[in-house]
Image (cartoon, helix red, strand yellow):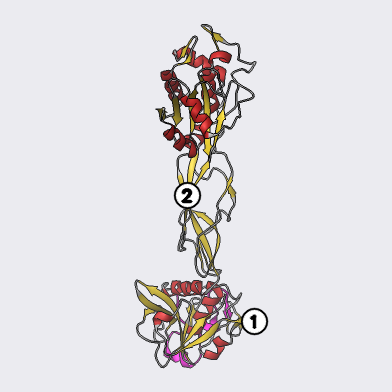
Amino acid sequence: MIKPNFYKQTDKRWQGYSWKGATVARNGCGPSSVANIVSVLPLLGHPKATPLSVFKYACKKGYIHPTCGTYYSGMTALLKDYGVKKVIHTSDMDVLKKHLEKGDMAVCLCGKSIFTSSGHYVVAYGLKGDTAYVSDSASDAKSRHYPKWKTLKNAILAHPSPQCWIIDNTAQYLGAYKVKFKARGGSGEMKTKTMYLDKAAKLPKCLFERPGFKFVGWSVGKSDYVNMKHFQIGKPKYKNRESVKNIAAPGKTVTLYACWKGYGAEAAALWARKIAANNDFTYGEDNHKNWHNHRDRAHQVGCYFCGTTINGPKKAKKGDKWEMTYCCNQLIFSALCHGANLFKKCKGGSTQISYWLNLKVKGAPLYRELGRNVKYSQLKPGDLLVKNGHHIKMYTGKVKGIHRVTHAAGEGWGKKSIRTDKVTGRIGSEYVALRYIGR
């Protein structure tokens, strides 16, 4: 709710100012109401407006009758002269009610009522439930009076000619801008938030969800930033529920995109797919001879992101041709290490079923056996397909309706030898499916 100023037309600083017999104290309720509104809406550009300055202007323009106060046409002209683009002049109480409920302000002409013994302009600036919020410039006792909607409605209708001047979309003159939220790979909905110039407000709690990922903040604009070492998508500028101010220009809309950090199986599967889509990563041997000689094995060179080999840390030198190589077992373990953030260092992995079934984090197993007689439609991203002692693949979900597995294939020895392949049918007699049951 936007509150007006509470200037009094009876203020000693200007109450006695006279023009053709009219004074601010006796005839200035119209200009005082306008001053109370325009002085709190920055984009109108009149922060120093007072009942006296608006009264003088209205007199100069001929908007005031010497004994009766502000003309109806004068009130419309006065609001527009002070920058209000759209003024709704109406006597329809349903229209007034609708606008007050959404936060618009209105100048209302009341008849004999709690406000006045004759015609009188007041500012109505909100309606919540049955409570109407009203500012009356003529009386200290009534200036912050909050009557029932019925009371305000009857006061307006009590005038022989009920009149209301509604400032449509009042918030825009306060410097309002909108903040939209995008899930960036997540799911769920979040409402657009309206914020205001020079006023700090907390961003709402993130309501988006993304399996296998933790929300870590908001980025401004859709960034392509991806940190593959500690798998994170998007670079946060604002934290969850952070207090912000002026993050967009008045009248504009800024879009904030959710940033995610991997912590589970789906993140590991996405990490593996991204590696497979990068042709700079290749299988760990340059030819079949080196394979049999156990030379240049990927797990001996070390993981590209943390430098760990099967025997422990051994960071490859910069420029080493095997910096970006993986064997199938190391690729899958690296997906768990860097994609799901389960381990600080890669351990090399294995193609033995027992290795994965015995793999634990904080005493809890990461996998359980599903068996051989399993359909791909029964798998979830992050599940493993293990050919005991020979090969291992990670199920990485459906892409364009087709089931996919990501792995490092020894028969390639070069570009595209780490790849994501489409699969159909059952797992088969050679492979055993393992279900990810970690966090």
Q: How many marks?
A: 2
Q: Tell me if residue 297 is in the magenta stretch.
A: yes
Q: Nearer the viewer, residue 237 or 426?
A: 426
> In the rendered structure, which amino acid carries the disc numbered 1?
Gly
Q: Which residue is disc 1 drawn over?
A: 363
User: Which portion, as a residue range, is magenta?
Assistant: 281-308
Image point (44%, 91%), residue name? 289
Instruction: Answer with left or right where residue 356 lies relative to residue 288.
Output: right
Q: Position of residue 351 (x, y in %)?
A: 50, 89
**Is 310 covered by the magenta stretch?**
no
SS class of the residue under badge 1?
A: loop
Q: Nearer the viewer, residue 28 or 274?
A: 28
* Residue designated by label 2: 192
Residue 226 visible: yes
Is tag 2's residue or tag 1's residue first in the polypeptide sequence?
A: 2
Q: Closer to us: mark 2 or mark 1? A: 2
